[in-house]
Image (cartoon, grey):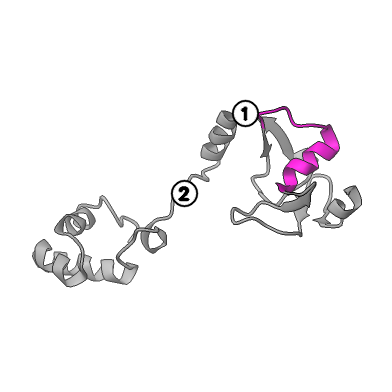
């Protein structure tokens, strides 16, 4: 198992990330099939180096690279510590704009909406034109949504 696992690692120097070259999850973490289960590669790397992970704890990355399996870059923490680490590193980035699952407008449409608002068009009329509510138009106008455009 260890040979099969290590065959999927692109090792660099000790201080560098060792990137996983096998299967990758939607979140960017390495995946490895072991004992009939798909497991995260960084957890297996931790276990190979340090032994069993205490129940209920997470394996966190110092390097903030989800593909990294270098044991020197990994450390143990609680779920709460994992969330604090995520927030501190600025990875809590919910999708905005067109990437949001519920988006009905595109960036191009929002630019047009902002131009129409600047020209004095009524929010209700703009909303009808784009198939959204007038409150959506006012949220764009007031900068509560689509601030990045």
- Number of labels in the image equals 2
112 relative to 27, above or below: below
Residue 123 magenta-drawn?
Answer: no
Q: Which residue is mark 1?
A: 78
Establish if 112 lies above or below 75. Answer: below
Residue 103 is tagged as: none
Q: Answer whether residue 26 is visible to the viewer in this image.
A: yes
Q: Which residue: 73% across, 27% down?
A: 54
Is 65 left or right of 95, judged from the image as shown? right
The residue range painted magenta reads 38-57
Kind of element beneath mark 1? loop
> Closer to us: mark 1 or mark 2?
1
Horizontal placement of 143 versus 5: left or right?
A: left
Quadrant housing residue 136: bottom left
Q: Which residue is mark 2?
A: 93
- Residue at 75 percent across and 54 percent down: it is 19
Q: Nearer the viewer, residue 125 or 53?
A: 53
Residue nearer the viewer, 76 or 143: 76
Q: Quadrant of the C terminus?
A: bottom left
The residue at 75%/55% (across/down) is 20
- Tell me residue 125's x, y (percent): 10, 68
Residue at figure coordinates x 19%, y 57% from the top left: 141
- Left or right of 101: which side holds 121? left
- Rendering quarter of residue 119: bottom left
| Label 1: few (<14), some (14–19) or many (≥20) C-alpha neighbours in 10 Å | some
Residue, far right: 3
Q: Position of residue 96 (x, y in %)?
A: 39, 56
Which of pointers 1 and 2 lies earlier in the amino acid sequence? Answer: 1
Residue 88, given in percent of the width and then of the height, sits at 53, 37
């Amino acid at each position: 198992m260890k040979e099969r696992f290590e065959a999927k690692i692109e090792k660099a120097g000790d201080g560098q990330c060792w990137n996983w070259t096998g299967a990758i999850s939607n979140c960017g973490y390495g995946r490895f099939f072991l004992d009939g289960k798909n497991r995260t590669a960084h957890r297996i790397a931790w276990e190979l180096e340090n032994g069993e992970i205490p129940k209920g704890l997470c394996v966190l990355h110092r390097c903030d690279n989800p593909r990294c399996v270098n044991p020197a870059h990994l450390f143990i923490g609680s779920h709460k510590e994992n969330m604090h680490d995520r927030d501190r590193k600025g990875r809590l980035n919910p999708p905005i704009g067109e990437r949001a699952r519920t988006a009905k407008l595109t960036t191009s449409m929002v630019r047009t909406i902002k131009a129409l608002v600047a020209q004095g068009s009524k929010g209700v009329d703009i909303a009808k034109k784009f198939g959204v509510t007038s409150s959506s138009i006012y949220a764009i106008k007031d900068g509560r949504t689509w601030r990045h455009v």
